[in-house]
Amino acid sequence: TRARVPGSQATRASATHASSSSLVWRGRQLTELVGSQMQPGRSSRDMRPLLAPVVWSVGVPDAPPSDAIRHNYSWLFESVMACKKKHLTILVADEDGEQFGKGGDESQPRQVLFVEEVTDLFQKHLPDFWKLGQAYFAGDLFVLENVSVNPKDEKDFKDMLRRLVAKLCWEVRLALLPPTHRSLVGSDLGQDSDGGKCNTWPVHTQGERLGPWLPQCLRCIRHCYLSLLKLEIPEENTAQIQQLIFDLRVHSMTCLFGQASEDVRNLLKSEVWRLEQDDRCGGTTQLPLMFENRVIETLQLVRENILVSGPKEMEVFQQINVQGAIKQLAQGVLLAFVETLEKCALSPDRLSPMIDSIGGPASLSRSPVEIVPSSQRAKSWKQKREDSLTTPPLEKRLLIVLSNCSFTSRVVIPRLQESFKRHGYPDMSPVIKVAQSRLMELDNKLFQKLLEAKCDPIVGAIEPSMYAGAFDWKRCPEPIGVSPYIKEVLMNLIEVHAEVYTISPPLVGRIMTPLAQNVAEEIARIYECTEKFTKYGNMQATLDLRAVEEAVDFYRNQSTGNYFMVCRSKLDPFGNAKDKELVDQLLEKFRTQMKLQLLCFKEDVVVSV
């Protein structure tokens, strides 16, 4: 019989306890190792559901599969925060280096890079979080028998999913949308996503400069949204993304139309005053067509990126307020061109700000030690001189812009109305009506300025020319021909006719008719102020009146005829046939001598504008 060693039972018990402790310790190590591998980015997506039951099967009570779900949630939530912090840090550094928020790609704002990265992050890892949760609640992660899912875990999972989606929507809103759109996300979204605690994007890095990039951001968010729809996530969890997409579509449309309005206003800088003849509207520049192309480009861009709705997205124009907004935006673009036309006619000096900054009052704000090199001053004045050579004088600009107004009203605006209809926009008839009305107002304004510019010199010269050389109707000699002042008036009218016809033939009748009326009115005023016509004075006045009346008969209106009647009422009938015959002979002589000049008053057809 083997002798019993004292204390051997205690030794075996101690060894058994040590072995058990070692097993627990090794189990915990295995749990930590496998659990760490289940975090996003540490293993492949397909391995995580397989690793979760390993953690649970080790038998360590504080390592349930729900911990893996929480690991995924915490990692994804913190990754969003880290991503935002990274881009904000780079943005501040870029601003200090005067890079104004651009990353490696000098053309992309930092907010755009952030949205691309954070949506890609969700697109890759949120499906893993969802699949892991579904596997857990379906019992696929349990190896041991008689194990049930904790009901609280399911509630927590839904809450975590809601918070992740809310976090994505909130951060995208902060980066891309103005504050007016952030209130639409719900009263609890800011709290759930810690929106109030997060650093916000600098205000000056947002706004219009993000406009051209919003369609690209919209595509990123839509791709992320589609990846969630494929998972069949409950609709209450995707409703926030739907609203985000809708708000971003509306905001993108607003920015694109706003940028179009600004581009249309800047078309003034592209005006080179090169005329191209149009049979219907006369000579026009490229400005109306550039305006039309810019508007159509915007309509196509909006249609391709915004109006086309994705799965489970609401139609943009279903809401009445959006219909009203797009009409206001479209009206803004059309009226911006009216402003551009007016500036082209009345204030086309595009280089004056630059000149002022070099040699004018604006330079007084510079540092006293700053000296502008003489070569720079010479170059600037040379540029100003070249600009003055290419920019026509006021009267010619008025004619050209009037022709552009006519072409825009008759051709461009109707074509744009068809484009709005073809691209699926709401009825734009009220917008078109407002634009046509404003074009008409501008047309009348510019025409009155042109009429004054052409009429005042002609009418103002009639009386001085009539009484040149101390002429007096009381001592008028026997007539030998039409008075020089009548010939001067007609030559001035012919000059206006030629200038208008060269630029815009349809404007000839419109400008010549009131000119003839003003000439007749001035002659009537002078005749009424004349106390008495002698016999020869009566013959001379009759000859002059018949000459001018016959010359402008083609542009005669009722008012012109009335003024000529006033003139005739101041004249007496001829006392004998000899006087009448002399006047007829002199008038025929005038017709023969001025035949070529008078041809411009004998047009067969004049197209009115």
Image (cartoon, rainbow, N blue to C red):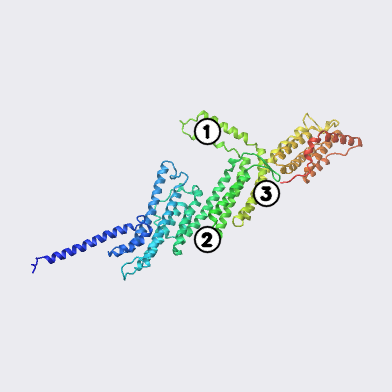
Q: Is residue 413 left or right of residue 301?
A: right
- The label on residue 314 is 2
CA distance for labels 2 and 1 = 54 Å
Q: Nearer the viewer, residue 541 or 187?
A: 187
Residue 468 appears in which quarter of the rendering? top right
Name the residue carrying label 1. 358
**Rendered view: 338 above or below 26:** above
**In the depicted structure, whether residue 377 falls above or below residue 132:** above
Apparent side of residue 136 relative to residue 360 in the rendered image (left or right): left
Mark whose residue sits in front, 3 or 1: 3
Res 410 label: 3
Q: Residue furthest front?
A: 1
User: In this orientation, does residue 143 appear?
Assistant: yes
Instruction: Give the Cα separation between the discs numbered 3 and 1.
Output: 43 Å
Count of labels in the image: 3
Q: What residue type is labelled 1?
A: Ile
| Of 545 and 550, the residue lying toward us | 550
Camera-side residue of 419 and 35: 35
Earlier in the chain: of badge 2 and badge 1, it is 2
The residue closer to the viewer here, 172 or 460, is 172
**Residues under numbered marks 3 and 1 in contact, where contact means CB atoms less than 8 Å apart:** no
Please rate how many residues cluster around mark 2, counting C-alpha atoms within 10 Å: few if below 14, some from 14 to 19, many from 20. Answer: some
Quarter of the picture containing the N terminus is bottom left
Tell me where residue 320 appears, x and y as whole percent: 56, 60
Q: Which residue is depicted at the point 42% across and 43% down?
A: 95
Of badges 2 and 1, the one in the foreground is 2
- Among the 4 quarters of the image, the one containing residue 120: bottom left
Q: Which of marks 3 and 1 is nearer the N terminus?
A: 1
The residue at 40%/57% (across/down) is: 125
Residue 487: percent from the left, percent from the top?
A: 78, 34
